[in-house]
Image: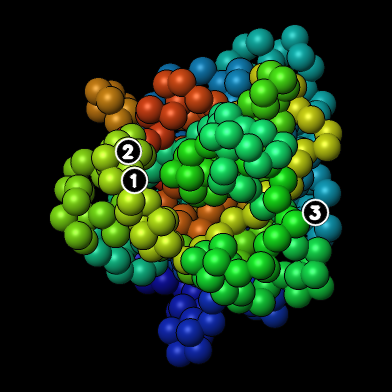
Amino acid sequence: MSIPSILLLGVLFIFLTGCFGPVKNMPVVITRESPVSAVIMPLQYPAAQYRLVSWKDLPGWQEDPLEDAWQAWLKSCQYLSRLQNSPAWTGACDRAKNISSQALKNNQVIRTYFETYFQVWEITQAKHNKQFAVGSPTGLITGYFEPTLKGSMTKQGPYQTPLHRFPESWQSNPNIVRPPRKDLLNSNTLHGQEIVWVEDPVAAAMMQIQGSGRILLENQQILRLSFAGTNQQRYQSIAQWLIDRKELTAQQASMQSISEWAKKNPQRINELLDANPRYVFFKILRDQLSVKDGPVGSIGVSLTPGRSIAVDWQAIPKGAPMFLSTTDPDDNKPIKRMVFAQDTGSAIVGGVRADYFWGSDGSAGMKAGKMKQVGRVWAILPHQLDVR
């Protein structure tokens, strides 16, 4: 089936101009009548291609227990309900609020809600990369977690590595590219911006990659930190740095293996960490979450283990329901479940690309550190939503 002319114009526009930002002057409304075979590159989400498919095309949709997914969806609605000029999202969330808690004990009620008010879009790659070609429905699925580091409010004893707040003098121009990590830490730029001191510099760097974490203080109190900004330097993988120098193989390059390498090579830790020029700043969560709550994602809601993912905002609408099909990094058993686009990250780039939130510490850290799986994703978007 041929692609409608309006879609060809949209794709040609992106190709000719190289535009990677939202294009608001060419609205196209997606409806139930959109041809199932049409492959589109949404102008608002140029990092992905979208293809309308059937609910029957979701592998494992009927088997997914949705009670905790529903709670994660209501969290997304806390964000989506505040959007202006988005009647598709606000309408879907208003309908969700009207479903009684008693009815929600039945999984089929939740399934029927989504099948009635939403439609399924398969996501495929819009750009070629080293592993996946344009149009491929498969991509890289990694994992992340909320770490807990031991720390102190003062620099003393084993606590010699600082975590910093975003400098107040930068607040007026937060998007300016600042000096790389090495230069920042070797200057006086961040003096006085220390929030807390931790004992493990590699764990601190890992926490920067994760974007949030908990600090266990000496008095056993928990300090929760969330993402506050960066120096706007491009993220570079320290795992890739080790692979390029044949210190680790690609198969070995997990968070655990990197930590082990650091213990064996303490004199090279700064060299390793400086390979990533990006530096992440934190802020203290003044409204401290309960111990059971996950960290706060980029849309301002607490993340749900196994139901929240980080995606590329150039590919996926913020807060959107999605469906993920991938495998467990330990035993390769299938993971097929509804998830929600509630977070983002500098290393998460492209349409078929997701970072799966495992939870906090323990087994979550082990799973996240090893997860480099192939997977597929689908966007679940309300009827009448204009994604182009």
Q: Which mark is residue 83?
A: 3
Q: Which mark is residue 216?
A: none
Is the C-beta separation of discs 3 and 2 under 8 Å? no
Which tag is nearer the camera, tag 3 or tag 1? 1
Name which residue lies at 26% across and 40% down. 264
Q: Where is residue 299 shown, x and y percent of the image?
A: 70, 48
Mark 2 surroundings: few (<14), some (14-19) or many (≥20) residues within 10 A: few
Q: Where is residue 386 shown, x and y percent of the image?
A: 65, 61
Q: Quadrant of the C terminus?
A: bottom right
Asked if residue 52 lies left or right of residue 155, the reply is: left
Q: CA distance from mark 3 to mark 1?
A: 48 Å
Residue 222 appears in view: yes
Q: Tag 3, which secondary structure? A: loop
Q: In which image quadrant can residue 242 be found?
A: bottom left
Name which residue lies at 71% across and 31% down. 223
Is the C-beta separation of discs 1 and 2 under 8 Å? yes
Q: Residue furthest bottom?
A: 16
On the image, numbered disc 1 is attached to which residue?
266
Q: Nearer the viewer, residue 202 or 10?
A: 202
On the image, numbered disc 2 is attached to which residue?
263
Which tag is nearer the camera, tag 3 or tag 2? 2
Give the amino acid type for the residue marked by disc 1 in the picture.
Answer: Pro
Work out whether 122 lies above or below 61.
below
Asked if residue 228 lies left or right of residue 5, the reply is: right
Work out whether 220 lies above or below 210.
above
Mark with earlier residue (3, 1): 3
